[in-house]
Amino acid sequence: MWIYEKKLQYPVRVSKCDVKMAKYLMEQYGGADGELAAALRYMNQRYSIPNKVIGLLTDIATEEFAHLEMIATMVYKLTKDASVEQLEEAGLGAHYANHDRALFYSNAAGVPWTASYIAAKGDPIADLYEDIAAEEKARATYQWLIDMTDDVDLQDSLKFLREREVVHSLRFREAVEILKEDQANKKIF
């Protein structure tokens, strides 16, 4: 299904070690509205959605995995030169005690990722509205993350991710309209 290209979807650069920012970015790594939850939600929903929009869900899920890789790269680069004391000061002492510097799917507060983040109703319109909401929540989170750093290199990558969330939301809105039109014309669902 996939061919992996050994490069990030968009370059990730950081100008400095910033452990606190890395902690905040973990929200998009393993949080309820983060990239892992989105990718798995869309992959799961594609099994109960009309054929007309399966490709859209697959495409966006695949891109969300690419975004997950970008976030992981950001967290790694922001923490790779940090001391244990810096990790503790930024609130990552418990993470270090459990995982050393390994990435772990959790949100910024350290709450582990859970499958309950994946919404799937089985009703295509309901699921697509859930997807629109997920993309808009991710867009908002990216904006807040942009606001929280003065690292212009990091802001550049975050702005790219924010804009992709906007595109995904628009694509899901188009899918809703396609399915609503089908529903009106064929009386399906």
Image: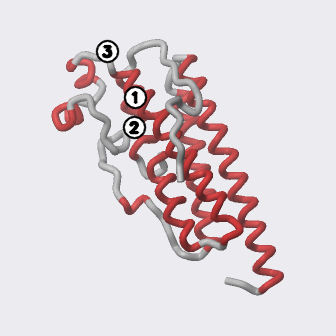
Q: Is residue 155 above or below residue 37?
A: above
Mark 2 in CB contact with mark 1 (< 8 angstroms): yes
Residue 81: assigned label = 3
Q: Dot 2 lies on which element?
A: helix
Residue found at x 63% / y 57%: 132
Q: CA distance from mark 3 to mark 2?
A: 17 Å
Rendered image quadrant of residue 72: top left
Please name the amino acid that badge 2 sits on.
Met
Residue found at x 65% / y 71%: 125
- Picture coordinates of residue 188, whole percent (x, y): 72, 84
Please name the amino acid that badge 3 sits on.
Asp
Quadrant of the image containing the C terminus: bottom right
Give the mark nearer the N terminus: 3 vs 2. 2
Give the mark nearer the N terminus: 3 vs 1. 1
Nearer to me, 173 or 40: 40
Please name the amino acid that badge 1 sits on.
Val
Where is mark 2, residue-wise?
26
Mark 3 in CB contact with mark 1 (< 8 angstroms): no
Residue 75: assigned label = 1
- Picture coordinates of residue 183, whole percent (x, y): 76, 80
Side (left or right) of 16 relative to 146: left
The residue lying furthest to the bottom in this view is 187
